[in-house]
Amino acid sequence: MRNKKTNKGEKGYLKSQKKVTIIRTIVLFALSLAIFLTGLISTGQKENLLTIVAVLGCLPASRSAVNMIMTLRFHGISQEDFEKIRPHTGACAVLADLVFTSYEKNFEIHHMAFKGNSLIGYTANPDCNTKACEKHLHDLCVQNRLSDVDIKIFKELPKYVNRLDSMQGLPDYEVEEEGKAPVSKAELVCALMRAISL
C-alpha cells in the first residue's frame, strides 16, 4: 500500500520533507561524484569536461543541502498536542507544521486556525518570538490585500484551545474580485500561509 502524500499545511509535512530532502541531497551529490569518477576513469586525469559538469552539478546539490539543513532544524506538532487541539477546531480552517522565514528570524508554528477575520497559531517552541511572527504575518497579509485579518500566536496550549472555542461563532466571509466568482476568505488566507511557509 502506498503512503498518501502529505501536503504543505498538513500534520506530518515537516517529517515527510525531511526524508525527501535527505534523499534528494544524497542522490544529487552521488550523481556529481559519479560524473567526476567517470571522467577520471575514462581520461586518467581530473582535468576534463566531466569534471566541470560534476562541479556544476554540485550547485543544485548544495542548494538541496541547505534545504535539508533548514528542515532538519524544525519538528512538527506532537501527536499529544494535535489530539488535544483536534476536538476544538470545529468549523475553522486549520493548518499544521508551518515554518515562516523572515530576514531576521524563523518562526515554527505547529498549528493554525482561521475563521471570520481571526487567524490564530500555536507554537510549542519556547524560542519563537510570537510578536515578531504576528507582525511578519500581518505585513504579508497586507501585501496580499488581506489587511483586516487579526493575527494572534499563542505559546500556551490551553489559551490557544480556549480561543479556538470562542471562534466557533464567527461568521465565514467571502472575498469578491471584479469579474471573478466570490472566494472563501478562509481559502485565501490558508493558501497564503501555505505559500509563504517553508
Image (tube, rainbow, N blue to C red):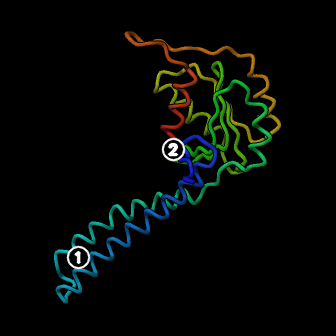
Q: Position of residue 119 (x, y in %)?
A: 64, 28
Dividing the picture into quadrants, the one containing residue 55 is bottom left
Q: Which residue is mark 1?
A: 51
Please name whichever residue, 101 or 8, is drawn nearer the observer in this view of the structure: 8
Secondary structure beneath disc 1? helix
Q: Which residue is mark 2?
A: 102
Left or right, 126 with respect to 172, comes to: right
Left or right, 83 with respect to 139, comes to: right
Residue drawn at (64%, 45%) of the image: 11
Q: Are marks 1 and 2 in contact (CB under 8 Å)?
A: no
Within-10-Å neighbours for mark 1: few <14, some 14–19, many 20+? many
Residue drawn at (62%, 47%) of the image: 108
Within-10-Å neighbours for mark 2: few <14, some 14–19, many 20+? few
Farthest top residue? 178
Q: Position of residue 73 (x, y in %)?
A: 59, 58
Identify whether 22 is placed above or below 114: below
Residue drawn at (69%, 24%) of the image: 91
Give the residue type at disc 2. Answer: Ser
Identify whether 184 is placed above or below 87: above
Please name whichever residue, 116 or 2, is drawn nearer the observer in this view of the structure: 2
Secondary structure beneath disc 2? loop
Q: Position of residue 35 (x, y in %)?
A: 27, 75
Left or right, 4 with respect to 119, comes to: left
Identify whether 112 is placed above or below 77: above
Report the mark closest to the observer, 1 or 2.
1
Q: Position of residue 103 (x, y in %)?
A: 49, 46
What distance separates the C-alpha of mark 1 from that of mark 2?
37 Å
Which quadrant of the rendered structure holds the N terminus? Answer: bottom right
Give the residue type at disc 1. Answer: Thr
